[in-house]
Amino acid sequence: MTGISSEDNATAPPARGQPSVTQIRHAEYADAAAVGSLLAIALAPKYRPTLGRRAAEALTRIIGHELRTPSHGYWVAERDATVIGAVHLATAEDAPPSGVAHRLAQVIGWTRALWALTALSILAHGPLDHDEAYVGELAVASNVRRQGVGVMLMRHLDAQAEARGKSRITLWVTDDNDAARALYTGLGFTEHAGRRWHLGRLIFGSRGAILMEKQVSAPAAP
Ligand SMILES: CC(C)(COP(=O)(O)OP(=O)(O)OC[C@H]1O[C@@H](n2cnc3c(N)ncnc32)[C@H](O)[C@@H]1OP(=O)(O)O)[C@@H](O)C(=O)NCCC(=O)NCCS
């Protein structure tokens, strides 16, 4: 089972003489707690106001269920047997998530679960087009940022999107997230639509979000 990087923990040093290697691999069920904790911490502006102080546990429950499906869209970056990054790619063919409210309620109670799902729906992308692959989550542990892990995870998605017959990758980023915007722009994403929200500002602290998009292959001939 993999460990979890936190905002405070340093990555374990490699054995003497062994350089650390970062590997991107499809997530396994045993990664659920590591990925849940990583997302809860790295995406605290999204998950702390909605899922509350048990956000990591709640996300672990939801992600653990998804990771039981062989075709799930989670990939992790691993270094020295520790999960240091995670990304999720969704396509229109994915089975719609089921039982999310129930699983959340088991951890944070029904009132909080219903509030969380309502608030998070402000950030939802909507139905995916047949040629579209959508990045729902991206997070890198704070102690290993600016080492190219985010780029590795995102580049991995190009091949995954193409393998699924998709010609473009889309994502939403909040307009105050300069690090992520710089990362995506550097990878060839361009900014498309924008969203402004009032309730979202109260909940998530940002004024709005930007839809970014990148072509990964020529569109299939009609
Ligand atoms: C955004 C995030 C995933 C970047 O991960 P990372 O592994 O540090 O990114 P990389 O090292 O691959 O950086 C690639 C490039 O992105 C840009 N970038 C990354 N972090 C940046 C920062 N803090 N400020 C400015 N530019 C930044 C730079 O252009 C960087 O290249 P450089 O280091 O050669 O200058 C990471 O900061 C994170 O997890 N943030 C919190 C969660 C989040 O915001 N997720 C995205 C939601 S849409």
Image (cartoon, rainbow, N blue to C red):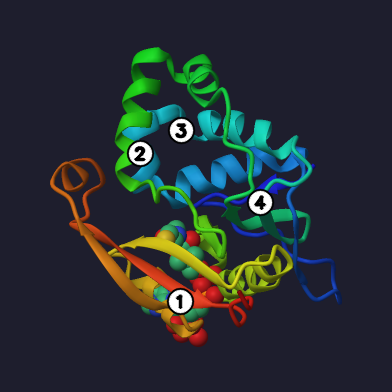
Residue type (three-letter) at the residue carrying disc 3: Ala
Residue type (three-letter) at the residue carrying disc 1: Leu
Whether 39 is drawn above or below 190: the answer is above
Picture residue at 59% right of the left edge, 54% below the top: 91
Return the disc, 1 or 3, that comes first in the chain's sequence: 3
Return the disc, 4 or 1, that comes first in the chain's sequence: 4
Q: What is the spatial separation of the Cα atoms under label 4 and label 2, in whole angstroms?
A: 19 Å
Circle number at residue 73: 4
Residue 116, image x, y percentages: 36, 29
Residue 136, image x, y percentages: 50, 53
Kindly identify which residue carries mark 3: 55
Picture residue at 47% right of the left edge, 17% below the top: 105
Kindly identify which residue carries mark 2: 120
Kindly identify which residue carries mark 1: 183
Residue 54, image x, y percentages: 46, 27
Q: Quadrant of residue 109?
A: top left
